[in-house]
Each structure stands twice: as C-alpha cells, then as structure tokens.
Amino acid sequence: MEGILKQLKKQREKLVKAAEHRDKYYSNRSEAWKDSATGVIYNEKTGEIADVVASLDITITELDNLLNDC
C-alpha cells in the first residue's frame, strides 16, 4: 500500500507541474487568444487537471490515514 501512496504522490507532483506550466502559458497569451475557442478549451482542460489534483489530494490523505491506522 505504501508503494501505491508513493506513486500517487509522484503523479500528483507531475500534474501540479503540468497545471502550473499551463497557467503560465495561458497568462502569457493575448486576450484575443484567451477569448477564442482554443483559449477557452485550453483553460477548461487546465481546470480539469486542477480537479484531478484535488481528487488525488483527497485520495492521498485517505490512504495515508488508512496506513497510519493499521
């Protein structure tokens, strides 16, 4: 189980880095691009990555609590 926890934390780190990179890229784009269909979809996908990170946070916490209770 600890191996799974370690993998989840590693995957979370990768997703956080990806989301930060996407945020930076999005911030550097023009307002016209941000308002375009491409920009809107890009921003939505970045939000979905953030949602996955939040779900991973919950899973990691629950698994960590389970391991500590054993």
Image (cartoon, grey):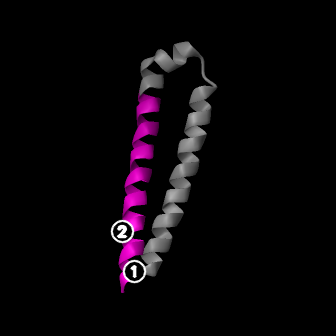
The answer to whether residue 22 is left or right of residue 4 is right
Q: Earlier in the sequence, mark 1 or mark 2?
A: 2
Residue range (magenta): 41-70
* Residue 21 higher or lower than 28, as above or below: below
Q: Residue 3 bears which disc, if any?
A: none
- Magenta: main secondary structure equals helix
Q: Amino acid at mark 2?
A: Glu
To which residue does mark 2 refer? Answer: 62
Q: Quadrant of the N terminus?
A: bottom left
- The answer to which image quadrant residue 50 occupies is top left
Q: Quadrant of the C terminus?
A: bottom left
The answer to whether residue 58 is left or right of residue 46 is left
Q: Residue 67 bears which disc, if any?
A: 1
Residue drawn at the location 51% of the way across and 20% of the way down:
34
Q: Position of residue 2 (x, y in %)?
A: 45, 80
Q: Position of residue 26 (x, y in %)?
A: 57, 29
Q: Position of residue 19 (x, y in %)?
A: 53, 43
Marks 1 and 2: CB-CB under 8 Å?
A: no
Q: Label 1, label 2: how many angstroms apart (C-alpha)?
A: 9 Å
